[in-house]
């Protein structure tokens, strides 16, 4: 048998395996109001598991999806892994997906609150009782902020490791009664994706709470999120353990403070040198409430380790930019006077925009969309991205910051069609 025949047979076997995996994928259901009693096995809405703690992981296989009806639940620990091609998915159920299902009612399409009750986590990946790494997991709130993780030491915790973890459409944090004790997200592992989420008020001065602290891993992407009032917004690596996070993409995020115990923007740790490491920060909007030139509320603090840090198309106001000069920076914008002044603007930068007013619609109320005449419109450099925070198309001459101008966009001047992404409903001071 020749090599070509072997290759063809191998391709057919691989395709058949994928088909078999897809065909065997099953749906399971959680509904706290189900009344099936001892017959609840999760297989239908009528026989739904009544708690997240009641999920029988022995029944789940890679590729399965667990749909969760709205309501308030206790701590949720994911106790099983999927595979790279067939992750385990836990998803909020919606009327659009389940309106014709037997046993479904429209009242079940409601927000899910996962309340840690003061325990170690609201959502745990491989936490008690497993205490082991779990990978290839998707947690999906289905629409913006559809799942709210609160009232625990950590909103989402993967301390034992989680490779290929996706967190989507979540709210993590609370400014008051249900405040998390430390980090919004904490853990380690490769291929982390956090998108379309609102991570806020994880700012305890006792525990040094952060929006996210990811101790180590490769290929981390944080996109289309709002980060508000976290002690340190994004903390990658750990100096005490000499661990780093490699190959990072932070893009189209809104990162801002209004009150709270905040003190830094993005922290990049890791004292060992790793050649080839890169970190890309593209088209974010920073407003860190830096009221004096005291070194706090910096865009970057500190920068350690050997890496290529690309900082492009970011809008910066009310922040300290002193460490931006240690990055490969290009076409960023800085507020250079007035209430929202940026301290220590880099002295030389290709394509830099400085202005006393960056042209946001309503910065005082955290609306960072671009008003007509904004100096940020069409002043970015092409970094290969295609959609802004609102889902507007981005062309070859993008605007600076997280938003293109107008209600639709094909680049810096408007046009095109908005995609189905949900609007950022929490872009308000509250």
Image: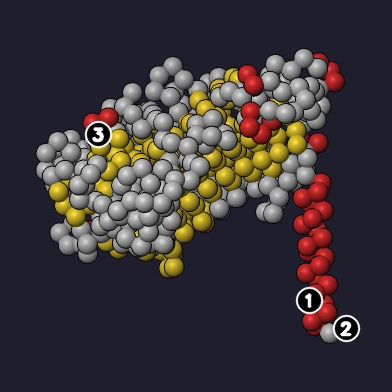
Q: In which quarter of the image is residue 55?
A: top right
**Above or below for 170 versus 274:** above
**Above or below for 61 versus 91:** below
Q: Residue 362 bears which disc, if any?
A: 3
Left or right, 167 with respect to 371, comes to: right
Q: Which residue is drawn at 34% across and 40% down?
A: 255
Q: Where residue 173 sits: x, y (%)?
A: 45, 28
**Circle 2 crowding by C-alpha within 10 Å: few under 14, some 14–19, many from 20:** few
User: Do we see residue 130 in this rendering?
Assistant: no
Depth check, mark 3 against mark 2: the one in front is: 3
Task: Residue at the far bottom: name it.
Answer: 2
Q: Where residue 408 sits: x, y (%)?
A: 38, 46
Task: Looking at the picture, tell me which residue is in the foreground, 17 or 45.
Answer: 45
**Circle 1 crowding by C-alpha within 10 Å: few under 14, some 14–19, many from 20:** few
Mark earlier in primary sequence (1, 3): 1
Task: Looking at the picture, tell me which residue is in the foreground, 398 or 297.
Answer: 398
């Amino acid at each position: 048998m020749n090599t070509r025949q072997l290759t063809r047979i191998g391709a057919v076997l691989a395709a058949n395996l994928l088909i078999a995996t897809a065909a065997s994928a099953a749906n399971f259901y959680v509904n706290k109001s189900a009344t099936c009693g001892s017959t609840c096995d999760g297989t239908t809405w009528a026989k739904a598991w009544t708690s997240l703690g009641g999920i029988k992981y022995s029944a789940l296989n890679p590729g399965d999806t667990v749909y969760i009806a709205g309501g308030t639940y206790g701590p949720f620990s994911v106790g099983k892994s999927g595979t790279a091609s067939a992750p385990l998915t836990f998803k909020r159920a919606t009327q659009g997906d389940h309106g014709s299902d037997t046993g479904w009612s429209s009242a079940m399409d409601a927000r899910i609150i996962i309340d840690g009750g003061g325990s170690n986590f609201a959502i745990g990946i491989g936490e008690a009782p497993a205490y082991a790494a779990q990978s290839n997991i998707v947690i999906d709130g289905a629409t913006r902020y559809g799942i709210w993780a609160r009232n625990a030491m950590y909103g989402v915790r993967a301390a034992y490791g989680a490779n290929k973890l996706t967190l989507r459409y979540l709210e993590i944090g609370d400014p008051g009664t249900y405040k998390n004790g430390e980090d919004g997200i904490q853990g380690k592992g490769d291929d982390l994706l956090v998108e379309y989420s609102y991570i806020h008020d994880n700012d305890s001065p006792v525990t040094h709470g952060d929006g996210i602290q990811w101790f180590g891993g490769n290929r981390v992407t944080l996109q289309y999120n709002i980060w508000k009032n976290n002690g340190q917004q994004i903390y990658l690596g750990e100096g005490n353990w000499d661990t780093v996070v490699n190959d990072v993409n932070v893009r189209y995020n809104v990162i801002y403070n209004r009150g709270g115990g905040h003190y830094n923007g993005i922290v990049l740790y890791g004292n060992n040198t790793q050649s080839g490491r890169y970190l890309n920060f593209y088209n974010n909007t920073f407003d860190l409430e830096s009221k004096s030139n005291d070194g706090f509320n910096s865009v970057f603090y500190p920068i350690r380790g050997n890496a290529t840090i690309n900082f492009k198309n970011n809008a910066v106001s009310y922040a300290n930019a002193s460490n931006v000069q240690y990055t490969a920076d290009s076409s960023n914008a800085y507020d250079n006077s007035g209430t929202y002044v940026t301290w220590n603007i880099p002295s030389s930068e290709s394509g830099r925009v400085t202005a006393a007013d960056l042209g946001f619609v309503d910065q005082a109320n955290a609306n960072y969309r671009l008003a007509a005449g904004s100096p940020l419109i069409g002043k970015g450099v092409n970094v290969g991205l295609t959609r802004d925070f609102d889902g507007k198309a981005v062309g070859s001459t993008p605007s600076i910051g997280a938003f293109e101008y107008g209600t639709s966009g094909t680049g810096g001047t408007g046009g095109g069609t908005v995609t189905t992404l949900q609007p950022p409903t929490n872009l308000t001071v509250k």
